[in-house]
């Protein structure tokens, strides 16, 4: 399976479409999911092309995981969360819909289920949640 440079996250990295960025460094980028399954649901991606875990380099995976851990601490603090769920899907059969490697970071509260997938979020609320995460990182 080949990397498609026209996937939506590649377009986000090239700033061809907007995103609500919460963190970036030399090799990784983190932004809010527009269909949040929990308040604070965000995605962490490598800046260099990788379709998913199967073709990513060990360094890409290491860099992304370092940012995932940093963002996990940030959402714990920003949302007073009790835990964090990480999700990552590989190929369509594995549940992947966007073919640029990404990890979902989902703050969780005891007894609160995730919302159903595929529901567009309120962009004003998402922007406010992003601000809370940026403040927690500062
Ligand atoms: P999956 O590949 O199954 O992990 O799903 C892709 C995820 O990307 C879903 O949670 C979508 O809500 C999210 N998503 C799709 N397009 C965008 C976008 N333009 N900005 C932010 N998140 C997106």
Image (spheres, rainbow, N blue to C red):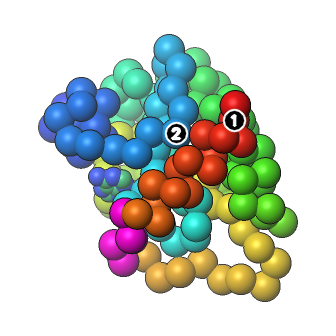
Q: Is residue 25 above or below residue 122?
A: above
C-alpha distance separating marks 2 and 1: 9 Å
Q: Which residue is mark 2?
A: 22
**Magenta span dominant secondary structure:** loop
Ligand 1's image quarter is bottom left
Q: Nearer the viewer, residue 76 or 134?
A: 134
Helix, strand or loop at disc 1? helix
The magenta stretch is 119-123
Instruction: Tell me which residue sits at (38%, 70%) in the image.
Output: 122
How many C-alpha atoms fall within 10 Å of the one at disc 1: few (<14), some, or many (≥20)? some
Q: Nearer the viewer, residue 54 or 8?
A: 8
Answer with the quarter of the image where residue 127 lies: bottom left
Answer with the quarter of the image where residue 117 lies: bottom left
Q: Is residue 121 inside the magenta stretch? A: yes
Residue 137 is marked as 1
Q: Is residue 97 inside the magenta stretch? A: no
Is residue 13 something one can see in this rendering?
yes
Residue 29: x, y in percent?
Answer: 47, 31
On-image quarter of the C terminus:
top right
Horizontal relation, residue 70 to residue 97: left or right: right
């Amino acid at each position: 399976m080949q990397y498609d440079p026209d996937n939506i996250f590649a377009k986000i990295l090239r700033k061809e479409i907007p995103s609500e960025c919460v963190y970036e460094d030399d090799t990784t980028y983190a932004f809010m999911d527009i269909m949040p399954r929990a308040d604070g649901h965000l995605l962490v991606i490598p800046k260099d092309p990788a379709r998913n875990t199967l073709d990513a380099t060990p360094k890409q995976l290491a860099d992304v995981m370092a940012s995932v851990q940093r963002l996990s601490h940030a959402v714990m603090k920003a949302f007073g969360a009790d835990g964090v769920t990480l999700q990552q899907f590989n190929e369509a059969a594995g549940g992947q819909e966007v073919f640029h490697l990404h990890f979902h970071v989902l703050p969780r509260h005891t007894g609160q289920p995730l919302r159903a997938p595929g529901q567009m979020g309120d962009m004003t609320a998402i922007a406010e949640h992003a601000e809370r995460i940026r403040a927690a990182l500062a």
